[in-house]
Image (cartoon, grey):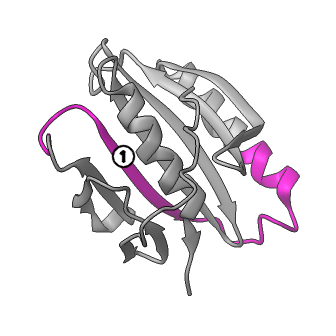
Amino acid sequence: MLPPPAVPSEAAPAQQLIQYGYVLDLPAGWAHTGGLPERRRSLLTPLAAPDGSDLISVELVPVGYDTGAELRRAHTELKAAFDAAVADGAPLTGFADDASYAGRPVVAYQESGDVDVPVDVTVDWYVVLDGAAQLSVGCRHTGAGARDVAAACATVVRSLRRVT
């Protein structure tokens, strides 16, 4: 998993992305460059390499119940989905429903080596449970981009929240 970088003591005001029922701070040097409306997905890429392999994907999935009140249920459902994907051949590892990232409790796991994910690219997934929603953040990075993606990913995970 990507280690979250230290938080600067004097950060400039962040630009925000408000879309598909969630809001997040755009990391410095990154832009909202695409998405998939039917999946409530936004894509963020570095301004210096918008067509590169390093990117962050954010997606909202409604779950139909309050995940705070039914945390065990949410974790059980996420683990079942993870296990089913692994059984179907998805290259997922490291499921942890008690993880912490960027100062927040998250469900975390990794993806690498899939047809859609080149061997030299890893996706660190962080799932934030917020009310009746699962907010999934996929932080895809190459070896060379790991540090920059980690900084951007921490900004996204730290600031991400559902809006109604």
Is 91 left, or right, of 67 in this rendering? left
Of the pair 14 and 10, the residue shown nearer to us:
10
Rendered location of residue 133, percent (x, y): 62, 67
As displayed, is residue 12 above or below residue 44?
below
Is 70 left, or right, of 12 in this rendering? right
The residue sitting at 71% across, 50% down in the picture is 103
In the image as oriented, which residue stretches furthest toward the bottom? 164
Rendered location of residue 95, percent (x, y): 68, 28
> For the residue labelled by badge 1, is the local secondary structure a helix, a strand or a loop?
strand
Q: Amino acid at mark 1?
A: Ile
Q: What is the quadrant of the C terminus in the image?
A: bottom right
Of the pair 109 and 74, the residue shown nearer to us:
109
Rendered location of residue 50, percent (x, y): 14, 45
> Magenta residues?
49-77
As displayed, is residue 137 above or below residue 51?
below
* Residue behind mark 1: 56
Asked if residue 75 lies in the magenta stretch, the reply is yes
Q: Taking the image as drawn, is residue 136 in sight?
A: no
The residue sitting at 87% across, 50% down in the picture is 72
Check disc 1: other Cα within 10 Å, few if <14, some if 14-19, many if 20+: many
Q: In which quarter of the view is residue 58 placed? A: bottom left
Rendered location of residue 132, percent (x, y): 68, 72
